[in-house]
Image (cartoon, rainbow, N blue to C red):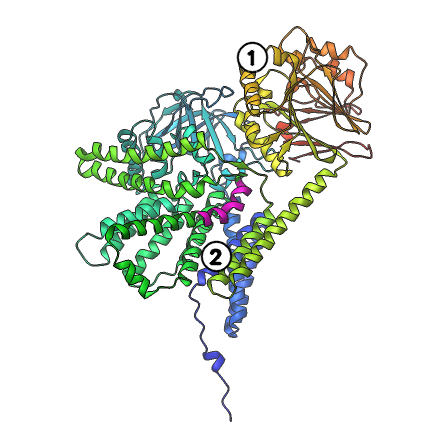
């Protein structure tokens, strides 16, 4: 009898990077649940079934099928993690009963950490309001008052309290009177979704108190827990930095060492953003890497066995990660540092890609929603790019013994100069590679990029390294040798000052930031998939460099062709789209005319002008629009134009229109705006009743109000009233029209309109009833920040339909070339 061949059974295959396979599987499960939102019952059923199937395949020794099944088990586990994190809360969770509308509450709970002072930042422009100082108090909810009784409640949040001082302490039980709400979701396409972000952090409750007296102590502090030393250490570091670093630089020091940006000035933050070096402010692996290198260089001088420095560095890394609240980029970097330390302790070789995959898996297990955050994505992509570059250069590095001998025989000044030049050149090459690889992701998330990051990043790393190392010494000296802290404070302040002045000078004298709608999500995913495959083939020398470049160029060409087709489609569009952007209490209306022309009617809001610009920018970029042919400013009211200065920074504008009165008798704010417009070389033109704008043969745009001399009364009464007609359909935009301007309009022949924007944000003080009777609208759109403004609760047939941007989000009206009924769509159903 011939024995059965067992060579295949005896064959053993060793996989040196198993986590590289598990990380994508886990990621697909998280993405699957985020996109499809399966029930936990379905996930549990799939997990149990696949585990049984894997056991059967393993028992039958079908190795490949069992491996595939095991990867599916990991994917299902990722979906379970995301579903539990995203959907499962306690029955007493307070945020589940809240809405975006504020409501007064009385709560009892515990202060979980030291209150953090948020100094009022001076307005960066004349269009912003001056705010009061605030405190942010970390708070754990225990009870909520319902009538005269207290009921159980739960949740972690922060209380924002206005005031200069506050008297609460960690572990103290307090009674809180506040306005409570949950974070509001995105009201416009492409806008940052604060509700999803807060839900991912599992901190959906938002509390605000107007006075520090609204927080009252009701009991003694809790007993110390094992986390108290960490809390005390964090507070100690923050206090020492504030005391040792001069004002104006202490916020920067705390930002790059602790990751807390509350005290960083808006001017410094904006300078880093516009020069493309904001990643230096975001606590990441770069900061931990610099600190680890500095600490390891010092630890090498410790007496003891060779593994002692690695053990000390491992403990220091763990302490620093906990100190900065275990942010995902730091967790990623700590895994790499920890694997390096463990490899040194065990005398093993570190497998970088396996360690990077382990960091990704730990981030998912810690918080599955973090993989959707821009910071996490950019951090991992940047590190992977640097690792690939290092491996690629190593595979093609050829050492010439003769050249090496010549280099060793050179004088030491020449050697130092050449080493420094090679190091600086390598840093610039690394910066260029990272910038190019991360550019699609940066444009997709932020729609802005600056080539200055290629030059400034390698330069600023040097002072930042000295600042981080000096901060570490400063904190150690404050404990061991307090008398040395003034000297170390001076040594830390100088590199911080160099960083701040370098980016500020670059921003003011050589600003180079370009804004873009960015690529679509499918193209970004395809780009990194293609890049990963090509990079792997290049590392293993299975793919020639010229073919690798050709494949990447082909995918870039796909994106270019897609953008060209989109531009052609926009230029040949034959319908008219009027979009009411949700900006809160303000006005922002985008009119997309046939054949690709775009008109903007107002852009402003009550409060932060940046929010108005951000909302409009999100809508424009979601539509692929980067140029506005004309902008109309309805009247001299800041909530109608205070977002324009930033809009002019981000988008090119053909011309700006305003009324004759605004140009002849401008307020201080309008004068500032008009000076900005003239400084940019944008034509400024005036409009008055009877004028028409010629943009398309089939579109009529007529100014109904005001006349050149205007009417007596407030600026609202002299709002520009714009009538848009297309294929027999009419849209009327009246700004903040009110009496006596209303009477000046309705005295003319009535005009039957399909869509009318409610005058003065739907305010009852505008007395718009006669105006509506004059224009007989079918739809009335309210651009407001209050959901309560609308039509009658029991509307009768034939009465106009009311829509509110505060409740419905962005409202889009489409007038077709056939002249049919207007197509009305809202962002929130």
**Number of other residues with Cα within 10 Å of mark 2, as a class: few under 14, some 14 to 19, many 20 or more:** many
Helix, strand or loop under label 2: helix
- Residue with the mark numbered 1: 667
Q: Position of residue 516 (x, y in %)?
A: 57, 38
- Whole-Å distance between the Cαs marked 1 and 2? 59 Å
- In this rendering, the answer to whether 555 lies above or below 147 is below
Left or right, 213 with reference to 314: right
Residue 58 visible in image? yes
Quadrant housing residue 191: top right
| Callout in the foreground (1, 2) | 1
- The residue stretch that appears in magenta: 432-445
Residue 53 in the image, given as x and y percentages of width and height: 55, 67
Q: Residue at x 58, y 12 (%)?
A: 666
User: Could you tell me which residue is drawn at 34 percent across and 63 percent down?
Assistant: 349
SS of the residue under disc 1: loop
Q: Is residue 545 above or below residue 325?
A: below
Q: Is residue 193 visible?
A: no
| Sequence-first tag of 1 and 2 | 2
In percent of the image, x 30 and y 38: which residue is there? 467
Q: Which residue is mark 2?
A: 23
62 part of magenta stretch: no
> How many marks on residues?
2
Position of residue 270 measured from the top left corner of the image (x, y, whole percent): 45, 31
């Amino acid at each position: 009898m011939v024995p059965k061949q067992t060579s295949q059974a005896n064959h053993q295959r060793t996989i040196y990077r198993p986590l590289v396979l598990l990380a994508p599987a886990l990621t697909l499960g998280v993405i699957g649940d985020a996109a499809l939102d399966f029930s936990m019952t379905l996930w549990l059923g799939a997990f149990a079934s696949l585990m049984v199937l894997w056991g059967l395949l393993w028992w039958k020794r079908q190795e490949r099928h069992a491996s595939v099944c095991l990867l599916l088990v990991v994917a299902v586990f990722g979906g379970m993690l995301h579903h539990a994190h995203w959907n499962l809360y306690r029955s007493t969770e307070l945020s589940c009963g809240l809405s975006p509308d504020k409501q007064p509450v009385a709560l009892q709970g515990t202060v979980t950490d030291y209150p953090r002072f948020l100094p009022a930042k001076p307005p960066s422009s004349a269009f912003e309001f001056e705010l009061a100082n605030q405190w942010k108090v970390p708070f754990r909810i225990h009870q909520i008052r319902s009538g005269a009784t207290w009921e159980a409640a739960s949740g972690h949040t922060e209380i924002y309290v206005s005031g200069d001082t506050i008297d609460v302490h960690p572990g103290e039980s307090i009674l809180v009177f506040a306005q409570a709400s949950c974070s509001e979701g995105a009201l416009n396409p492409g806008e940052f979704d604060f509700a999803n972000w807060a839900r991912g952090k599992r901190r959906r409750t938002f509390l605000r108190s107007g006075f520090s007296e609204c927080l009252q102590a009701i009991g003694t502090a809790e007993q110390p827990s094992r986390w108290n030393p960490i809390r005390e250490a964090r507070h100690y570091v923050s206090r020492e930095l504030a005391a040792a670093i001069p004002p104006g630089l202490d916020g920067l020091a705390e930002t790059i060492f602790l990751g807390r940006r509350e005290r960083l000035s808006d001017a410094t933050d904006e300078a880093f953003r516009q020069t493309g070096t904001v990643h230096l402010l975001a606590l990441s692996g770069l900061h931990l890497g610099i600190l680890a290198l500095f600490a390891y260089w010092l630890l090498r001088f410790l007496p003891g066995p060779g593994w002692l420095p690695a053990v000390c560095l491992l403990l220091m890394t763990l302490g620093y990660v906990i100190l900065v609240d275990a942010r995902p980029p730091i967790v990623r970097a700590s895994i790499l540092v920890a694997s390096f330390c463990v490899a040194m302790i065990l005398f093993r070789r570190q497998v970088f890609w396996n360690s990077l995959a382990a960091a990704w898996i730990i981030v998912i297990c810690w918080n599955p929603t973090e993989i959707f955050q821009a910071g996490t994505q950019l951090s991992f992509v940047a590190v992977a790019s640097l690792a690939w570059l290092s491996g690629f250069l190593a595979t093609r590095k050829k050492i010439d013994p003769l050249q090496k001998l010549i280099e060793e025989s050179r004088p030491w000044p020449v050697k130092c100069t050449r080493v420094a030049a090679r190091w600086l050149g390598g840093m610039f090459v690394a910066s260029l590679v990272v910038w190019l690889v991360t550019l699609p992701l940066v444009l997709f998330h932020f729609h802005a990029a600056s080539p200055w990051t290629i030059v400034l990043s390698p330069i600023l790393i040097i002072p930042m390294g000295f600042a981080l190392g000096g901060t570490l010494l400063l904190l150690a000296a404050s404990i061991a040798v307090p008398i040395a802290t003034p000297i170390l404070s001076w040594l830390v302040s100088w590199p911080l000052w160099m960083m701040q002045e370098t980016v500020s000078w670059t921003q003011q004298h050589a600003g180079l930031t370009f804004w873009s709608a960015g690529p679509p999500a499918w193209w970004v995913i395809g780009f990194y998939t293609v890049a990963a495959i090509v990079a792997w083939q290049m590392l293993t020398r299975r793919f020639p460099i010229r073919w690798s470049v050709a494949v990447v160029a082909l995918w870039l060409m796909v994106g270019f062709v897609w953008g060209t087709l989109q531009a052609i489609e926009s230029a040949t569009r034959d319908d008219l789209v009027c979009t009411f952007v949700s900006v809160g209490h303000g006005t922002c209306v985008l009119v997309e005319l046939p054949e690709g022309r775009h008109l903007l009617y107002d852009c402003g809001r009550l409060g932060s002008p940046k929010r108005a610009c951000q909302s409009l920018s999100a809508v424009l970029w979601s539509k692929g629009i980067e140029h506005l042919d004309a902008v109309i400013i309805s009247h001299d009211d800041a909530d109608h134009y205070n977002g324009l200065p930033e809009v002019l920074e981000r988008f090119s504008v053909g011309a700006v229109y305003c009324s004759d009165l605004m140009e002849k008798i401008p307020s201080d704010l309008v004068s500032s705006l008009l000076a900005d417009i003239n400084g940019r070389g944008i034509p400024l033109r005036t409009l008055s009743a009877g004028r028409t704008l010629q943009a398309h043969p089939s579109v009529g745009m007529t100014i109904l109000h005001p006349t050149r001399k205007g009417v007596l009364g407030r600026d609202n009464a002299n709002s520009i009233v714009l009538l848009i007609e297309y294929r027999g359909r009419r849209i009327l935009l009246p700004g903040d029209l009110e009496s006596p301007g209303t009477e000046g309009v309705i005295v003319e022949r009535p005009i039957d309109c399909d869509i009318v924007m409610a005058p003065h944000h739907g305010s009852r003080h505008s007395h718009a009833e006669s105006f509506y009777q004059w224009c007989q609208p079918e739809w009335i759109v309210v651009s407001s920040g209050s959901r309560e403004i609308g039509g009658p609760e029991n509307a009768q047939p034939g009465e106009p339909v009311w829509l509110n941007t505060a409740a419905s989000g962005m409202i889009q009206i489409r007038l077709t070339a056939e002249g049919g009924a207007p197509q009305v769509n809202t962002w929130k159903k």
